[in-house]
Image: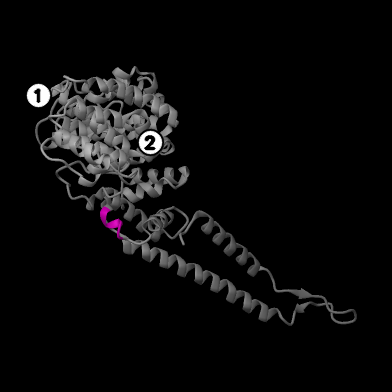
Amino acid sequence: MTLSRTDSILSALSFASSSRLSAHSSTEYDTTPGSSTSTVAGPGALAGKAVKALGVATLKGFERLVMARHWAAVTHAFPHTDQQAHGIRHIDEVYWDLLEFSRPGMYSHNVNRRAMALIMAQIGAGETRHLIKALTRWHAVELHILLSGILTQLAHLWNPSLSGVFSSPLSHSYTASQGWIGIESPLLRLIFFISKVVRSSAWACRVVLDVGFLDVLFSLNHHHFYRHHHHHRGAENDEVHHLYIACNALLLDITGYQESRWFVARHPIASTWPTYEDTPNVFPFKIRRRALFLGPDSDVALDEQSPFVGITLPDVCSQPSISEIPPDKLLRLLSFNVTYDQALRVFLSRSSHKQKVMLLSKLFWCMSKLVKPGTGLLDDPLWRYQYSFSLHFITAVARSDPQNKEALIDAGAANYLVDSLRAMPKAYAAATQIIREYGFSGLLKLGSVPDHTIQQSIVSAITALFEDSE
């Protein structure tokens, strides 16, 4: 059993009704004609009042007992890592109760403060997978209240001018849970958390905007990024640089929802957000791979040569819909930068199966040019990059959602992988032989093949497509 808004309201109404009834005078009756005109308490009044008082006390005691048991279960489960949470019984209900106890005005100040401290500690530790899952079940108004409270408690971090005049009793729970204080900005975990909230759903993104988080980023720009814009050396500047990478990733998460782009474009942040001009056009593929298709459980990698550094916010806000971009251009954009990653993820989450298949089949048609006979230039770094991207793209999309996996198969992903093996039989002889003898199930059972990194990527893509279908 979990606590809920309805339970709280009914409990309050029940108690209020009982209180009003107990405030009334006891039942009275008129004497028969000829007797005294005064009124006296009925013969059962004392017994009735005693029974009623016992019922109210019992009800209140039972409610307190239930709440105490729920609260004990919550406090016993924290703190924990995302991995440890899998071993906690009824973890989803535990987080649901934690959010319930955090609602201001519904429970005692002490319980509310301690519940918020547990939430702040999980955010500070970066262990928020189950918290994000619970928030997706919450009402938008409740999320708005929670985020407002979190930003208020951490206001002295994102606006240092408040440090001398602002008291934040809960910020210690947030900062004390971080193992990297002095190495990275204490705000980094907050940015990671907000990014995951944004990626969880469109309505959650809208709440983040409504709560004023663009103003928070504007303040970060003023107090942190502006004076470090042209400096990259030293521990302090690395700390700011990593925070800038995380904020850029968050802005791409927000603008991944097309309806949010106008909101960002009309905010002062659009014209003042810094852009680094000295970013390379092509990044090592291992860096691009770590940034590909980030979901609600992922943190952006803080690579020195991060693809999130070179974004230009006005251009991002004015970018067209995914479906309006020619497929060859879209494939090129997806391959070499991160600007359209979240926009594609949103498109796939919102589109019908037919629309997904139509877009993905066009991308596979463009990818197929990479695996025509004679084009497998393993010594060509650019070819290896593009081909590796196509394989990891299939893997990432297939594992993002079962419906996306079905769309990939119907769009021809399996044919593309088979054509890859046929076009380069010598380089991929082991995988080809396994498929010839045992089919795709042979690769799934084997799990890996020897010799080549790209060959391993092919196996990973095939596994992602068919591991639940065999």
Q: Is residue 30 left or right of residue 184?
A: right
- Can residue 195 be seen at all in this image of the molecule? no
The residue lying at 39 percent from left, 36 percent from top is: 205
The residue lying at 21 percent from left, 33 percent from top is: 289
In the displayed structure, 104 sits above or below 449; it is below
How crowded is the residue under tag 2: few (<14 C-alpha within 10 Å), some, or many (20+)?
some
Disc 1 element = loop
The residue lying at 62 percent from left, 63 percent from top is: 17
Which of the labelled discs sits on residue 317, or is there none? none
Disc 2 element = helix
Of residues 148 and 369, the one drawn nearer to the viewer in this rendering? 369
| Residue labelled with disc 1 | 379
Of residues 396 and 251, the one drawn nearer to the viewer in this rendering? 396
Instruction: Specify whether residue 38 is painted magenta.
Output: no
Q: Are marks 2 and 1 in contact (CB under 8 Å)?
A: no
Residue 245 x/y as whole percent: 22, 32
How crowded is the residue under tag 1: few (<14 C-alpha within 10 Å), some, or many (20+)?
few
Amino acid beneath label 2: Glu
Tell me which corner region of the image, top left, top right, bottom left or bottom right, holds residue 102: bottom left
Q: Is residue 274 left or right of residue 50?
A: left
Residue 175 x/y as whole percent: 24, 49
Amino acid beneath label 1: Asp
The CA span between labels 2 and 1 is 34 Å
Where, quadrant-wise, is the C terminus in this rendering? top left
In the displayed structure, 195 sits above or below 22; it is above
| Residue labelled with disc 2 | 406
Of residues 97 and 216, the one drawn nearer to the viewer in this rendering? 97
Magenta residues, start to end: 83-87
Instruction: Specify whether residue 84 is painted magenta.
Output: yes
The disc, 2 or 1, on the residue closer to the chain's N-terminal end is: 1
Residue 242 x/y as whole percent: 19, 35
